[in-house]
Image (cartoon, rainbow, N blue to C red):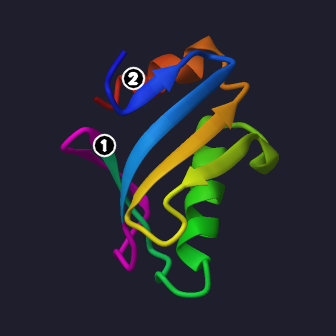
Amino acid sequence: MSDWLTGDAQLATLTLHIQPGAKTTGFAGRHGEAMKIRLAAPPVDGKANKALLAFLATYCAVPKASVELISGQTSRAKRVRIAGLGAQMLARLKALD
């Protein structure tokens, strides 16, 4: 498994580098040991964090309640835990590497 994605299909942890205020939201490739995600949301009043969690829930086809920001609330470097991914989604995330 890559260094930015740890765990398994039941409980995975993603190490991310966030670029808020981008034109579009989406994965943007590796950034050191993290996966870079561009977010269209601005980094004010927690909007970028909310947009990140919503984007990951949609991308991974899991309920929003299954996606949790575990570190980096005010930083570009964030760690997110996702529960109940399933084997196919875990493979899809690994393929981003």
Q: Sequence-wise, which precedes: disc 2 or disc 1? A: 1
In which quadrant is the N terminus drawn? top left
User: How many residues crowd around disc 1 within 10 Å: few (fewer than 14), some, or many (20 or more)?
Assistant: many
Quarter of the image where one finds residue 62:
top right
Q: Which residue appears at 39% of the width and 73% of the height?
A: 20
Quarter of the image where one finds residue 94:
top left
SS label for mark 2: helix
Q: Position of residue 59 (x, y in %)?
A: 57, 43
Quarter of the image where one finds residue 63:
top right
Q: Which residue appears at 61% of the width and 78% of the height?
A: 46
Residue depth check, mark 2 versus mark 1: number of the one nearer the observer = 1
For the residues marked 2 and 1, what is the alpha-carbon distance in whole angstroms?
Answer: 12 Å
Is 29 a magenta residue? yes
Can you identify the residue that label 2 sits on? 94
Can you identify the residue that label 1 sits on? 34
Disc 2 residue type (three-letter): Lys
Q: Position of residue 4 (x, y in %)?
A: 36, 33
Q: Looking at the picture, does residue 83 appear above or below residue 36?
A: above
| Residue 26, label in figure | none
* Relative side of 96 to 25, left or right: left
Q: Position of residue 65 (x, y in %)?
A: 81, 47
* Relative side of 12 to 97, left or right: right
Q: Which residues are magenta?
A: 19-34
Is 20 a magenta residue? yes
